[in-house]
Amino acid sequence: MKNICFVNTTNFWGGGEKLHLEYALKFAERGFNVYLAAKKNGPLYEKAKGYKLLHYDISLNNLSFLYPLKYRKLIQFFKKDKIDTIVISSSPDLKTAALSAKIAGVKNIIYLRGLAVPIKYTPLNKYILKNAVTHIIPNSEETKRMMLKNINDPKIDEKINVIYHGIDLKEFDEKPIEKLFEKDKVLLGNAGRLTPQKGQKYLISLAELLKNKGVDFKLMIAGDGELKEELQELIKEKGLEKHVILLGFIADMESFMNSIDIFILSSEWEGFGYVIVEAMAASKPVIAFDITSNPEIISQNNTGFLIKYPDVEAMAEKAETLIQNEKLRKSMGMDARKSVENKFQLDDKITEIINLFQ
């Protein structure tokens, strides 16, 4: 079993696309013939051009499963190149590529699930999950719990194995670190899309509490999104312009994490908080709400603090504790790094996946 194809036709660059590229490269390192089926000139296709991967151009959407030509094209590709394993993440890709792979006789049809929301148990989804997909890999216990909310089927349960996302520490450590901003005080950091799910409104309330207590700090928020103007107005309204900085999109997350002192995740839910792992890899203590998958990553009082949702005052108290105690920051940061080394190494996750289908 040496010919593996990652099917990802998503037309934007996100966590799932980053994961597919990282996994594809790691499988190539292990001696697999790795194909990337993606939309030509799409972000994933373009980013993968510089690597020695075999490319296949395909465009899919939610209705592609209604068109026989899409099936025919994929079936011919899977058979011609003797693909024995495919990896899929998005719903449109699952509907068409999984069925095509089943017809083509692909042995391993792996569904990586990263979205912590219930699967709609339609007749089509039921058939695909029971009869086409061979392995289902949620990225956390929380994702598994949520995806099965509408499903009670032992035949599907037996296909599920939770495997956390991993980080390539060698690449993380060896990448040159750029100085992103001047550091004249303790820096709190947050990174994520500026959307309601990510809860940046809680960060601004936290900053207001810290400012009113006379705590010396600065909060750096990396990311862009639909709430940018609303958050800017809120910062101005509360007089926090010198304390809260919206940085916009930051591509170099390694440098960002190495530039801050404390990472705070304000999300209302996460399937798997990969950004927490990135912060911990940079030896930063983490503060987050005690919800969804966060407790699977953060060890309470060891690698960070888990706060009852949505108690911003308690979150501000823990932030103040870390701001004022450099020794505690460094101690927790060291424990956070060790946790990543023990639980979230990318090479270990690739081995877990390989062991599933070999």
Image: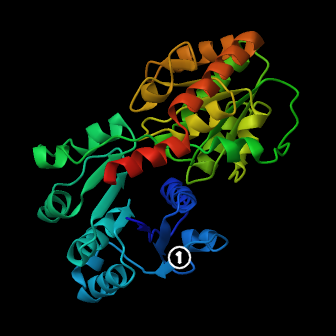
Work out whether residue 248 can be spotted: yes
Residue 111, given in percent of the width and then of the height, sits at 32, 57
**Towards the viewer: 49 or 40:** 49
Q: Relative to 84, is 26 above or below?
A: above
SS under mark 1: strand
Residue 353, given in percent of the width and then of the height, sits at 40, 49
Q: Relative to 96, is 142 above or below?
A: above
Q: Residue at x 85, y 40 (%)?
A: 181
**Towards the viewer: 15 or 226:** 15
Residue 178, given in percent of the width and then of the height, sits at 84, 46
Work out whether residue 166 can be spotted: no
Q: Which residue is mark 1?
A: 54
Could you tell me the amino acid type at mark 1?
Leu
Q: Relative to 175, is 26 above or below?
A: below
Q: Residue at x 15, y 57 (%)?
A: 130
Q: Left or right? Give the position of 110 relative to 350.
A: left
Q: Left or right? Give the position of 343 relative to 86.
A: right
Residue 81, given in percent of the width and then of the height, sits at 40, 81
**Towards the viewer: 179 or 221:** 179
Q: Left or right? Give the position of 148 relative to 41.
A: left
